[in-house]
Image (cartoon, rainbow, N blue to C red):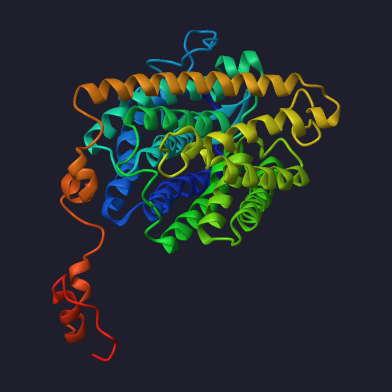
Amino acid sequence: MPLAAATLDSGNTSWLLVSTALVLLMTPGLALFYGGLNRAKSVLNMMMMSFASIGLVSVLWLLYGFSLAFGTNGSSGANTVIGSFTQYLGTKTFIPEIWSSAGTSTGIPTYVVLAFQMMFAVITVALISGSISDRTKFAGWLVFGFGWFTLVYVPVAHWVWGGGFIGAKIGALDFAGGTAVHINAGAAALALALVLGKRVGWPRESFKPHNVPMVALGAGLLWFGWFGFNAGSELTADSTAAIAFVNTQVATAAGLLGWIVVEWIRDGKPTMVGASSGAVAGLVAITPACAFIAPYAAVLLGLVAGAVCALAVSLKYKLGFDDSLDVVGVHFVGGWIGSLWIGLFGTHSVSSLVAHDGLVYGGGVGQLGRQALASLIVTVWSFGIAWLLGTLIQKTIGLRVDKEVEVAGIDLAEHAETGYDLAGLTGGHPVATRLTARPATAPATSGKE
């Protein structure tokens, strides 16, 4: 809730400005993570979907998203479905205004809060794209992003964080985005994967990551930026931000370990892709719970999320849906685990926001039920709207590229460029030139050439 007259706190403002920049960095990090997991011939299309989300959602958030998600509607401010249609409309200015949280001034200008929450909206839309890589028209993606942001992300953000019914009426907790971001994006990712159908050749052909170092770099940037995502969600620089920071680190570390242990037992070898994916699974799971649980519980959460998500990614083969880069297995499943964990390990001794201790602390199943209900509501709403939007776009302007384009690679057809100039790798070297110029029917050399 905004407060008209309050004193600027330069420390809190500086912390949130830095956190905002960290969260913005996560989307380019996601582009690298997804891009490396993708095939080389469509890497730019994959990365463009993340970068385009920065452009599209930033403008929409300023114009109407922030007002609808965090504005108050009516004199009482008691609308639990949607925020204000006018309070923070993009045509208005509110430079002197200082933001307040739970009736207490944070000392932070409202514009800084607007910018911070903008970055959450950006990456939530971008997350969805990982499920539909290798086969999606860029124009169709932009139309979907606009529709899903408006009809799903904005109202869900209000329901969870803006005084809406999930937080205010149901009493479910979500500190930094387990329901509003990860379950939300994961449910939409599943819907779009079903609408678009399987990639040509999947699962018969191998769809291995084309650049594992890029995957690791992307995961590292996500890990780095996530401290702003989680600890920054306190808005102020205090002890709650501190425990959110520590919990984010240890849960992510444990998630990495949990995933590679499963790989080691199941496949005989731990992998760099697995370590990167496990770290992301830990980050996802700790997001809703980071300020509500003790650090030991964060470690347990990371271990469970890493192991379960590693197993969950194989469900797409058993159930027959082509979630290209495992958005469902990591973000949807990890988001649910993190949300439910609050009902198990959340405790008032860590945060005063936990009105009902979790089951482990003798609080019964009440909070666990609240968390499950909130997660289910977001799942159903996001999946349903995403499926309708995807189907509508597919039947009008088209959402999936032609088969020929998909087989050849989307980058040239959709963006007139390629990620790698493979022809330039020869560099005129005599041996390389001879090798690339040899007729396809020529026998291989013995190595004495």
Locate the N terminus and report the quarter of the image it occupies: top right
x then y, percent, for residue 60 = 33, 29
217 in relation to 86, above or below: below
- Number of marks present in the image shown: 0
- 266 to the left or right of 398: right
Which residue is found at the position 59% from the left and 61% from the top? 270
Q: How far across and down, in percent of the image, does residue 6 sit? A: 56, 30
Residue that protrudes farthest toward the top in the picture: 75
Occupied quadrant, residue 253: bottom right
User: Quarter of the image containing the C terminus?
Assistant: bottom left
Whether residue 6 is visible here, answered yes or no, is: no
Could you tell me which residue is drawn at 24 percent across and 37 percent down? 137
Left or right: 71, with 433 as reference point: right
Indicate whether 240 appears above or below 371.
below
x, y percentage for residue 392? 27, 20
- Residue visible at 32% across and 46% down in the picture: 46
> Is any part of residue 314 visible from this angle?
yes
In the picture, measured across the screen, residue 156 lies left or right of residue 423, that is right
- Quick one: 411 or 265, which is closer to the camera? 265
439 vs 92: above or below: below
Q: Is residue 52 above or below residue 408?
A: above
Give the farthest residue toward the right. Answer: 362
Query: Seen in the image, is 153 located left or right of residue 252?
Result: left
**Residue in front for this viewpoint, 431 or 145:** 431
Residue projecting furthest to the bottom: 448
Towards the viewer: 231 or 75: 231
